[in-house]
């Protein structure tokens, strides 16, 4: 196949991709914080003594874990404004869809980490008159988080890659900006090759940092 590669239009419009990269990173950071934080809250809710709270937490996990993120983003963008008197922009719809879906998966990761702690540690903490909240905060969670760091970091990587789904509602992120250039210059091969390379360059340092964190935690446990 004789194909003449031409990256010149992409390099000439690098500002367009730079704007998209900023949008991607912005979405990633917000969804990461909300997804992990809400996931911990939901995981604790699944262990609550109040049955309604346990039921709501479980329902949240099942709904958002068993429906596609893309459908969730589209639902928040198109359907929610019909049901409620609110205006949902592309950025908000993407945050809601990605964050809530990630919270559901993160909740199960946190729950698994909490349940992995030996029962004797719970009993020992209660024996020295710690309240349930103190046991969870001072004894259980620090150990559970160390055990689930690999799973949480993988979740973070998935959140980063899911940011591309925001392009379906025309949020200004890297893939959406690439599609814009490709539609103007009719060069999808070059554009999507550059997009893939940019995602790798942005994500690979994050992955290496997570590996370093895992090794550091492993040495401290030794």
Image (cartoon, rainbow, N blue to C red):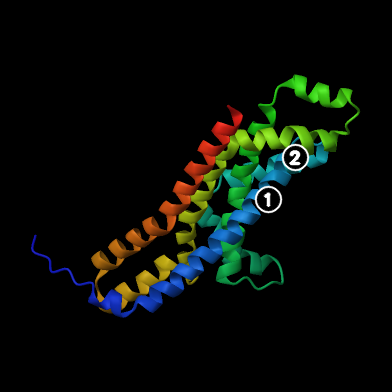
Compared to residue 13, the image places residue 36 above or below, namely above
Q: Secondary structure at mark 2?
A: helix
Name the residue carrying label 2. 44
Q: Secondary structure at mark 1?
A: helix
Residue placed farthest to the left in the image?
2
Find out whether the residues at labels 2 and 1 contact each other: C-beta distance under 8 Å: no
In which image quadrant can residue 57 be found? top right
Where, quadrant-wise, is the C terminus in this rendering? top right
The residues tagged by marks 2 and 1 sit, at their Cα atoms, a distance apart of: 11 Å
Q: Residues within 10 Å of mark 1 (few under 14, many from 20)?
A: some
In the image: residue 196, left or right of residue 97: left
In which image quadrant can residue 29 be found? bottom right
Residue placed farthest to the right in the image?
129
In the image: residue 154, left or right of residue 104: left
In the image: residue 139, left or right of residue 15: right
Where, quadrant-wise, is the N terminus in this rendering? bottom left
Q: Residues within 10 Å of mark 2 (few under 14, many from 20)?
A: some
Name the residue carrying label 1. 37
Judge whether residue 169 can be spotted in this image.
no
In which image quadrant can residue 118 be found? top right
Residue at 55%, 63% (x, y): give it: 27
Nearer-the-camera pick, 6 or 64: 6
In the image: residue 110, left or right of residue 172: right
Judge whether residue 115 can be spotted in this image.
yes
Compared to residue 68, the image places residue 8 above or below, namely below
Among numbered discs 2 and 1, the one appearing first in the sequence:
1
Residue 20: percent from left, percent from top: 44, 71
Residue at 61%, 38% (x, y): give it: 109
């Amino acid at each position: 196949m004789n194909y003449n590669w031409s990256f010149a239009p992409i390099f000439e419009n690098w500002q367009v991709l730079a704007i998209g990269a900023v949008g991607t990173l912005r979405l990633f950071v917000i969804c990461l914080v909300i997804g992990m934080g809400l996931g911990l809250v939901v995981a604790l809710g699944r262990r609550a003594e109040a049955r309604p709270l346990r039921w709501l937490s479980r329902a949240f996990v099942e709904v958002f874990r068993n429906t596609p993120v893309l459908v969730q983003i589209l639902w928040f963008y198109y359907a929610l404004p019909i049901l409620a008197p609110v205006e949902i922009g592309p950025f908000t719809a993407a945050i809601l869809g990605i964050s809530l879906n990630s919270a559901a998966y993160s909740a199960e990761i946190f729950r698994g980490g909490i349940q992995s702690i030996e029962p004797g540690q719970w009993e020992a903490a209660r024996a020295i008159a710690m309240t349930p909240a103190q046991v969870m905060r001072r004894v259980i969670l620090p150990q559970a988080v160390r055990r689930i760091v690999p799973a949480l970091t993988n979740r973070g990587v998935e959140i980063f890659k899911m940011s591309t789904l925001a392009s379906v509602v025309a949020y200004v992120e890297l893939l959406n900006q690439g599609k814009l250039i490709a539609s103007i210059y009719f060069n999808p091969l070059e554009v999507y090759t550059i997009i893939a390379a940019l995602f790798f360059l942005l994500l690979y340092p994050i992955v290496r940092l997570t590996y370093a964190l895992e090794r550091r935690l492993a040495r401290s446990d030794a």
